[in-house]
Image (cartoon, grey):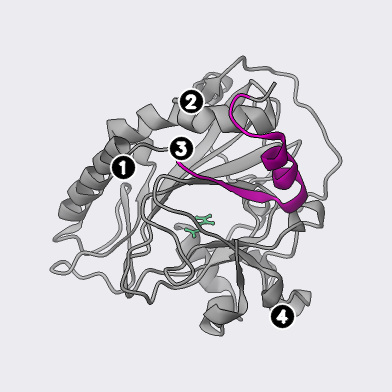
Amino acid sequence: MPEVLTQAQIDEYHEIGGIVVKGRISGADLAEIQAAIEQSREEARGLTSSTERLDLEDSHTPDDPRIRRIKLPHTQYEVFQRLMTSDAILAPARDLLGPNLRLHTTKLNMKMAGFGAAVEWHQDMAFYPHTNDDVLAIGVMIDDMAEENGPLMIFPGSHHGPTLDHHVDGAFVGAVDLAAEGIDLNDAIKLTGPAGSISIHHGRVLHGSALNVSDRDRRILFYEMMAADAFPVMGSMTGFASLEEYDERMLCGEPTIEPRLSDWPVRIPLPQPSERGSIYEIQKGLKHRGFSIYDEGEVDER
Ligand SMILES: O=C(O)CCC(=O)C(=O)O
């Protein structure tokens, strides 16, 4: 029996590769998250470049702090760690991946009103291929996520297809050239919802999000995780020094040393780009950027 998702939501996730579940995060937790973000903004004041904790917008200046991402927020503020191990996040993940879950990473993407950076089209598992594809990302919507403020977009069903080419001139750039792949932007859908909703997207679904040129912030907190028997394959951007450290990432259930192999089309994200920063930096290697030509009105809302 599923813990929280309806059978219709589970079926939709498997068919489309992404769903929105409303009302998973309380107003009190959202308020605590906002307070943590405010603290980070103060921390960014005076900085001249990104740090281990904060990734800064290209337009950031020390006097006008602009954060693009809070890195590994669960290691920085208690609220993110608490949510990560709560049923608000883990129950829907267990409904989709089973009882044994391991963390891949966390991040809080800011996308502030008027200037928040786009994330180019990509598949998460192109960055971190694993032995099976029971891999997903849960996005906590901190602000109302709507048509106009750069919501997450996915290509429905793309998780059933190939792992697309994320390379340029022989180096991994973590982004897909839609035109070169013959993919029509009109086929993408937006994962929208009120603050406190979560989105869940499959590790193989093609997704991205546009610049936020609206007057409303769009902040989303991602918890990326996998079934405990999905092990990274060569080149995967999953860093760990030992099995002990790897097992410290268990979110619930039991670890294993018996990887499950499934038949899915792996591509290795090597060679790594010379620029080894966040996704925003890596994707600058893409020659034809999808979102400079992006026309908001052409994509259906979901
Ligand atoms: O913030 C977004 O809209 C997308 C984020 C994403 O896909 C990523 O950071 O890998």
Label of residue 179 in the image: 4
Of circles 4 and 3, the one toward us is 3
Check if residue 8 falls in the magenta segment: yes
Cα distance in 3D space between marks 2 and 3? 9 Å
- The quarter of the rendered structure image containing the C terminus is bottom right
- Between discs 4 and 3, the one toward the N terminus: 3
User: Which three-letter amino acid code belongs to the residue tagged 4?
Assistant: Ala
- Between discs 2 and 3, the one toward the N terminus: 3
Quadrant location of residue 291? bottom right
Q: Disc 3 beta carbon < 8 A from ligand 1? A: no
What is the x, y in percent for residue 279? 50, 59
- Between discs 1 and 3, the one toward the N terminus: 3
Residue at numbered disc 3 = 24
User: Which three-letter amino acid code belongs to the residue tagged 1?
Assistant: Leu
SS at mark 1?
helix
Residue at the farthest top position? 254
Check if residue 104 falls in the magenta segment: no
Look at the picture and state if 100 lies above or below 52: above
SS at mark 2?
helix
Of circles 2 and 3, the one toward us is 3
SS at mark 4?
helix
Label 4 with label 3: CB-CB less than 8 Å: no
- Nearest the viewer among 232 and 135 is 135
Residue at numbered disc 2 = 87
The residue at the point 62 percent across, 42 percent down is 136
The residue at the point 56 percent across, 80 percent down is 297
User: Which three-letter amino acid code belongs to the residue tagged 2?
Assistant: Asp
Cα distance in 3D space between marks 1 and 4? 38 Å
Residue at numbered disc 1 = 30
Give the magenta range: 3-24
Of circles 1 and 4, the one toward us is 1
